[in-house]
Image (cartoon, grey):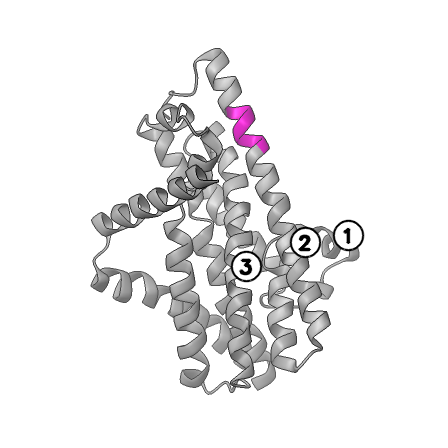
Amino acid sequence: MRDVLRIVRESLVLGLAEMGAVYTWRTWTFGWLVRLLCQATFYALLGRYVGDEETMRYVLVGNIMVLACMESAIVVISLAGERATGTLPLLAVTPSGHLPVYLGRGLQWTVTGLASSLIAWLALPPLLGVPLPWPRAALAIPVIVVILVSSYGYGCALAGIALRLHGVEWLVLNFAYGIVMTFGGVNVPVEFWPAPLEAAVQALPVVHGLEAVRGILDGAPAGHVMGLLGAEALVGACWYAVAALSMDRLVSAGRRDGTLDHAG
């Protein structure tokens, strides 16, 4: 466990250093963050245009929460980049095992995802005139963390596709995020979709966590909210299991046929 925690810490340090080589605080704030805030604002205003103030709040809350999924899923790009640069085999031969290293490779995106979501949660509702029931709305912050963790596992699982099919990482990322945003209750309730699709989307991250946030805002019983939070955590655990199985098979096959270091 100590080795795993050390790997997590070093992976986070590496990831943040990597981000520091790409972004300054100005470019991150006025480039990336503003872009995310504008996206959430656009959908909220669209909700107001086609509906009413309640619709606007529904859409705004959904689009703020889904930012956590969007950024966490960028781990797909980080892991695909290891293969493109030829460093994937080095991660596979670490003494502590490849899984902690692989799963920790994009942890920096959970940090920026948390920052983006919190800033949006605090800034956009008053800016757009959407009242939230403070201080009760602060209880949504731990839920954001659970959504981040769940979504990161989702991204790690889908990274297995990008590691096997070269050059599709951006397609995988946008599909992963887009399917959650479209069907996961962000802009319309999941009950809007046909029953088979409604049942299928229960396996996606964000769905249960977002419902928990809406329950907090509406004053739902604590037991109901905790049940939804547990469901979100369970979904995340399942995606981590899929990620672990996928990466184990990738490494085993790569060692056997010598394709682990193939850069696409």
Query: Left or right: where does residue 249 sit relative to residue 77?
Result: right
Q: Which residues make up the magenta segment?
A: 245-250
Q: Nearer the viewer, mark 3 or mark 2?
A: 3
* Rendering quarter of residue 93: top left
The image position of residue 13, as x and y in percent, is 30, 47
Determine the CA span between mark 1 and mark 2: 9 Å
Mark 1 nearby-residue class (10 Å; few <14, some 14–19, many ≥20): few
Secondary element at tag 3 = helix
Query: Magenta-highlighted stretch: main secondary structure?
Result: helix
Q: Kindly identify the residue that appears in the image at 60 percent across and 83 percent down.
A: 54
Position of the C terminus by quadrant: top left
Q: Amino acid at mark 1?
A: Pro
Q: Kindly identify the residue that appears in the image at 52 percent across and 53 percent down.
A: 149
The image position of residue 138, as x and y in percent, is 51, 77
Q: Kindly identify the residue that appears in the image at 34 percent across and 30 percent down.
A: 84
The image position of residue 40, as x and y in percent, is 45, 70
Image vertical order of residue 28 relative to residue 93, above or below: below
Residue 105 visible somewhere in the drawing: no
**Label at residue 196:** 1
Q: What residue is shown with label 3? A: 147
Q: What residue is shown with label 2? A: 201
Question: In this orientation, which residue lies closer to the viewer: 29 or 193?
Answer: 29
* Rendering quarter of residue 71: bottom left
Q: Amino acid at mark 3?
A: Ile
Q: Are marks 3 and 2 in contact (CB under 8 Å)?
A: no
